[in-house]
Image (tube, rainbow, N blue to C red):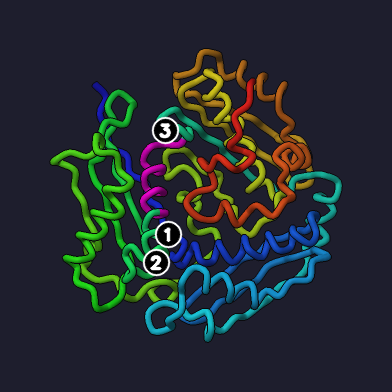
Amino acid sequence: MNKYYFTSESVTEGHPDKLCDTISDTILDECLKQDKNSRVAVETFASGNEIVIAGQITSNANIDIEKLTREKIKEIGFDNEKIDIDYKTCKIHINITKQSPDIAMGVDVGGAGDQGIMFGFACDETENYMPYAIDMAHKLSKRLTQVRKDKIIPYLRPDGKTQVTVEYEDEKPKRIETILISTQHEENITQEQLKEDIKEYVIKYIIPENMIDNNTKIYINPTGRFVIGGPLGDTGLTGRKIIVDTYGGYARHGGGAFSGKDPSKVDRSAAYMLRHIAKNLVANGYAKKCEIQVSYAIGMKEPLSINVNTFGTGNKTEQELIQIIKNNFDLTPDGIIEYLDLKKPIYSQTTNYGHFGKENLSWEKIIKI
């Protein structure tokens, strides 16, 4: 019997890094609404009551970046500079230039916007073909935000993190070993009340009863206090939650972040395409678990390499699966953009609670191969 434990984490939309991802993707979406051919690479930095937005935008769109930023901070729920950040009073610094002509000359002819490696992954552990630990962590984080915004637990603040440890037996999730939730809260609430409410309205609501037993450990705000949060508690930066964004560490990641990048950047678009292919190889019965890697060179259309790993669960060889991929999918940047319809302003949907496993996104669609 093969027994082991695996842990994944997620964060709420009020985590400082996710605040920055959200601002970057909101700017991207607004550019694409007005000009579908916008080239966008925007990074956001948050510290204390200040936001810095920098990067490159080449677009016919006319957008008010400061207004968009304040609206998004307000939507998340940040309104107090003494404990996190205030959408009304925060300072916003903007440094935006146009895309480098040296990069543009390769992208203009349909080549990749950069060199790099990308991975896609899927497994049959959950209905959405995601690893079980990250799926549960995302659902807990999303529920944390829901109970705050719906005022089920009205004293919560936007910042929060979740973590789930799963016990595997013979490569299948058997039970949950540990649940860890850290959530920002107002100062006047007792830890006893907080723990009781989180267990009742978050954990019981999300975690299946058959996955928890008397030995499952539950930790809620283990330091005993989490009042100061958001960018006042810790700086935030676009692209610093790439493992939360993908597979919770269960599969490899090429290193490139997603948020704030238009689809000509293969860091984002190729990772989406590989998730689509891996998911459909599993859904079509070719394997129970599948990881795909491709590599690109800046300015070149076709990938330099393709690798498939089914971890011994496939019913065809990896070379046969690579040929199936080549026969069915166009992996050039333009081919990926057209196939997944990536020039639409869809990216704010992806920012929080993972870029994969959401059935309304084009790369999550199941097809027949």
Q: Residues within 10 Å of mark 1 (few under 14, many from 20)?
A: many
- Rendering quarter of residue 173: top left
Dot 2: what SS? strand
Q: Residue at x 25, y 29 (%)?
A: 3
Q: Which residue is mark 2?
A: 159
Q: Earlier in the sequence, mark 1 or mark 3?
A: 1
Measured in 3D between alpha carbons, the distance from the residue under mark 2 to the one under mark 1, in whole angstroms, is 6 Å
For badge 2, the amino acid type reads: Asp
Instruction: Determine contact: label 2, label 1, CB under 8 Å.
Output: yes
Residue 338 position, x and y percent, is 76, 40
Residue interval drawn in magenta: 130-142
Looking at this view, name the residue that lies furthest to the left.
Answer: 214
Locate the C terminus and report the quarter of the image it occupies.
top right
Measured in 3D between alpha carbons, the distance from the residue under mark 1 to the one under mark 3, in whole angstroms, is 21 Å
Using the image as rendered, state which of residue 242 and residue 19 is in the foreground: 19
Dot 3: what SS? loop
Task: Specify whether residue 137 is painted magenta.
Answer: yes
Q: Residue at x 19, y 43 (%)?
A: 216
Q: Which residue is mark 3?
A: 126
Residue 249 position, x and y percent, is 42, 43
Q: Residue at x 33, y 62 (%)?
A: 152
Residue 65 position, x and y percent, is 67, 74
Task: Specify whether residue 348 is painted magenta.
Answer: no
For badge 1, the amino acid type reads: Thr
Q: Which residue is mark 1?
A: 12
Work out whether 46 lies above or below 291: below
